[in-house]
Amino acid sequence: MNKTARPSLADGYSVAGLLRAVLEKGRPCRYEARGSSMHPSIQDGDVVTLRPLAAEGPRQGDVVAFVPPGTESVRLHRVIGIDGGRYLMKGDNGLAADGLVERRDILGAVARIERHGRVLRRGPAFAAAILARLSRTPWFTRLSRRLRRTIGRRDRKA
Amino acid sequence: MTDKIDLAKAYRPSEEVVVREIEGETVIVPLTSGVGDLEDELLTLNETGRAVWARLDGSRPLAEIIRDLEAAYDAPDGVIREDVIGLLQELCDRRMIVAGE
């Protein structure tokens, strides 16, 4: 029996089935997030813990893991709107929304984020709701990108 | 400390694991402390492990499974038995299998 390198987790392929299987048992699941679409909230290499969805489903502002229709990849994005039982998703750092996603394609909600071994402090729920509303405005992404550039410059100086 | 493996008992996967076949590998996620940890606790089985795992259905005594494997695989006397008991003891210690009713 081998402890293994994570199989094909880099692009999310294959991990969807494992995440779904664990979360459907009502258990949280911890895995490494990849990509920059949720920067700065979630950064490439952060370890996130997903919790199973509550019965009432995700709320606006929640960051959730979902499988975009027609793919086997896993995406971590924010719910920025709810329309007739479907969920509008968008990465905080993305230019455009992903479109509407069915509840069945949502695996779980982000409950905890670890960066470099430290658990990040989460903001209040209302802050996530505000972020979700802001995500519908084009200047939010510009602001987010400016913040990212600023952080990048600061990190390079350090 | 967990029980020693008993050849007369039948074993089956615990409810505390999630198992999936991925790209020809058997991948096991133990729900350590109630959390499925794909970051640190993902396990795969080698060929022997897969052959054993596939036979753990909770109905056949371990001795019968060992006889089955000895008939299916060519190995020096005692080697398969030793390997299987070693694997099951590790699985049992990790609470990934339980003895059937």
Image: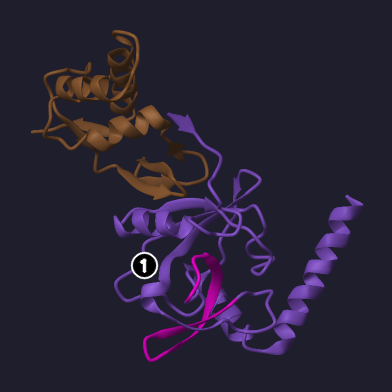
Q: In which quadrant is the N terminus of chain A drawn?
A: top left
Q: Specify the color scheme.
A: by chain
Residue B42 belongs to magenta span: no
Q: Residue furthest top?
A: B77
Q: Is residue A73 at all visible to an observer of this figure? A: yes
**Which percent across, then down, holds residue A85?**
37, 86
> Which portion, as a residue range, is magenta?
A70-90
**Which percent across, then down, holds residue A40?**
69, 65
Which chain does the purple colour mark?
A: A
Report whether B67 appears left or right of A20.
Answer: left
Front residue of this view, candidates B18 and B25: B25
Front residue of this view, candidates B76 and B19: B76
Q: Residue furthest bottom?
A: A84
Q: Magenta residues: mostly which secondary structure?
A: strand
Which chain does the brown colour mark?
A: B
Residue A85 belongs to magenta span: yes
Q: Residue furthest right?
A: A157
Residue found at x 31% / y 32%:
B51
